[in-house]
Amino acid sequence: MSAQPSTDPIKFAYWVPNVSGGLVTSTIEQRTDWGYDYNRELAVLAENGFEYALSQVRYMASYGAEYQHESTSFSLALLLATERLKVIAAVHPGLWHPGVLAKLGATSDHLSKGRFAVNVVSGWFKGEFTALGEHWLEHDERYRRSEEFIRALRGIWTEDEFNLAGDFYRIRDFTLKPKPLNTPERPNPEIFQGGNSTAARRMAGRVSDWYFSNGKDYDGAAEQLHDVNASAAENGRSVNFGLNGFIIARDTEKEARETLREVIAKAHKPSVEGFRDAVTQAGKSSSDGKGMWADSSFEDLVQYNDGFRTQLIGTPEQIAERIVKYKALGVDLILAGFLHYHEEVEYFGRRVLPIVRELEADLPAREPVSV
């Protein structure tokens, strides 16, 4: 497909390392930490080029992530420590009621002056639900519940005496005050979602503000963009597109490639294999077999959202050129992970980002990129 590049600068988000083990399941040294002090410093540092941060969520120890800070409370703490950064809290329908999250989100939005956002995660980890005594739904039903959750959340945030008679939620004459801030930039906190399956793509077109994709090459990103945009057009909407990518930026390509090889060579096999067994089943359980991780290799899963596939690995110039090619396809945001967060976020802002902005300036004059 081909697409005219957006005239808006591509945005950047980073995965908040509020989960132990870093962003790769490997015994390679990772100079990062899941604690608050480290993450507070990181958030302040990231305001020099990153617009968003995404707080992860797992509810029980698993697959190399033994310790985790809860996402909504951690997001609020980061919001209060920063001035410009927007923080996205990941939440699971089925473990949250939309009315309770709406209340928390409205408070967080006021305290942060309009910088709170939410990522609605339909869920892949059956063990978390069953351990908590919650009913586990099949793949497409989880996305149907997520869609109803988003409709309820947005309705509560924007309407008085909101009503919903759904299959998963019943809400009667519910009025939330105060509601989140209504700003020129957005009428309510932005709602993100992830997924690879057809159910996820169609849901994004109907209700979400942003669609997050696992790591993809150009062809994979183009295919998902086509489907999400088609679904949005059918519903008279538009959806922003975010792409996951693990960034290894080094002074030489050889050094970057050696780092990637070491990450994979030192993979913690029991953790990767356990994660693979859980997520491969979840991905293949979608009605069309296109769910997240359905075709991921062992090497892909060392970075648990397929971040190596995006191939943001090399010199600052190589990475910037690849990012701008993704932008030319229609990608609006890169969701980045790093090995050593403080050092590499600083390096990215100093060495990679200026090249991205320089290359972007030429995009309107270029022919659309075809893949």
Image (cartoon, grey):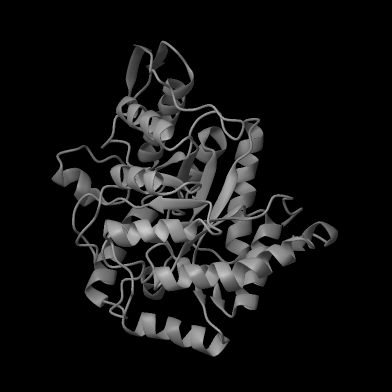
Determine the residue positioned at 24% across, 49% down: 126
Determine the residue positioned at 60% across, 39% down: 231
Residue 16 versus residue 84 in the image, above or below: below
Q: Residue pushed farthest right?
A: 365
The one of 82 and 144 positioned closer to us in this rendering: 82
Residue 217 versus residue 36 in the image, above or below: below
Compared across the picture, whether 1 is left or right of 184 comes to: right
Determine the residue positioned at 62% across, 55% down: 331
Compared across the picture, whether 368 is left or right of 282 comes to: right
The one of 72 and 140 positioned closer to us in this rendering: 72
Q: Quadrant of the C terminus?
A: bottom right
Q: Residue 263 appears at what percent x and percent y?
A: 37, 80
Q: Residue 332 appears at what percent x and percent y?
A: 62, 52
Q: Residue 362 appears at what percent x and percent y?
A: 80, 63
Determine the residue positioned at 46% across, 61% down: 45
Residue 207 versus residue 242 in the image, above or below: above
Q: Quadrant of residue 141?
A: top left
Compared across the picture, whether 154 is left or right of 27 comes to: right
| One can see residue 122 in this view | no
